[in-house]
């Protein structure tokens, strides 16, 4: 698997956009999922937790504090394991629920990429992974990324 100049077609270049995709989480299509290959933790924000109809009793304990993007310490509300589907591939992911504002609904990190056998490119704004005998691609939505940026700034 590799990326080429052709993989940039359809993106506005140059850019400094995050890699944001739509994934099926817990049986629902979820937009605004950030792929963060630099993170160790998969994160879920309250909006998605509530929209999935999850309840406090669905959470497992998680007591390690996290550091947010703005450098503040965040105490997680707990952890929940859910299926995350990309194309035909399904990977079980342990999301840490944090009670913090984000214009993203969730963040998937290195452990999700590794479990899927995927590689990501922020330059090309794509995730590629093998599915049976072919290469699948998750393609970004650059306009959604920019909407997230505007939402974060105005918040």
Image: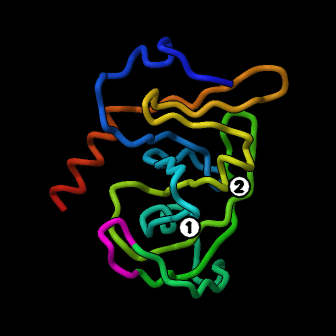
Q: Position of residue 53 (x, y in %)?
A: 56, 67
Q: Residue at x 46, y 74 (%)?
A: 98
Q: Which residue is mark 2?
A: 83
Query: In this picture, which residue range is highlighted in magenta?
Result: 68-73
Based on the picture, tell me whether residue 70 belongs to the magenta stretch: yes
The image shows residue 97, relative to residue 11, as above or below, that is: below
Q: Residue at x 64, y 86 (%)?
A: 61
For label 2, count other residues whose C-alpha is less than 10 Å away and answer few (under 14), some (14-19) or many (20+): some
Quarter of the image for the C terminus: give it.
Answer: bottom left
Q: Do the residues bearing badges 2 and 1 touch, measured as CB atoms within 8 Å?
A: no
The image shows residue 121, relative to residue 115, as above or below, that is: above
The image shows residue 82, relative to residue 122, as above or below, that is: below
Q: Residue at x 38, y 71 (%)?
A: 68
Q: Position of residue 13 (x, y in %)?
A: 30, 22
For label 1, count other residues whose C-alpha is less than 10 Å away and answer few (under 14), some (14-19) or many (20+): few
Based on the picture, tell me whether residue 141 belongs to the magenta stretch: no
Quarter of the image for the N terminus: give it.
Answer: top right
Q: Position of residue 128 (x, y in %)?
A: 63, 30
Q: Secondary structure at mark 1?
A: loop
Q: Which residue is mark 1?
A: 53
Cα distance, mark 2 to mark 1? 15 Å
Q: Is residue 102 left or right of residue 124?
A: left
Main secondary structure along the magenta-highlighted residues:
loop
């Amino acid at each position: 698997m590799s990326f080429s100049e052709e993989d940039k077609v359809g993106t506005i270049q140059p850019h400094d956009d995050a890699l944001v995709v739509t994934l099926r989480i817990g049986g629902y299509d979820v937009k605004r999922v950030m792929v963060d290959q630099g993170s160790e933790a998969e994160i879920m924000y309250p909006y998605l937790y509530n929209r999935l109809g999850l309840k406090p009793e669905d959470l497992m304990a998680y007591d390690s504090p996290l550091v947010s993007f703005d450098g503040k310490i965040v105490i997680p509300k707990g952890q929940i394991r859910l299926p995350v589907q990309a194309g035909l591939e399904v990977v079980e992911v342990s999301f840490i629920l944090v009670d913090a504002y984000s214009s993203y609904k969730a963040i998937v990190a290195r452990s999700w990429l590794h479990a899927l056998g995927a590689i990501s490119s922020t330059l090309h704004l794509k995730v590629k992974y093998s599915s049976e005998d072919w290469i699948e691609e998750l393609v970004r939505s650059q306009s959604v990324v920019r909407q997230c940026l505007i939402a974060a700034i105005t918040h």
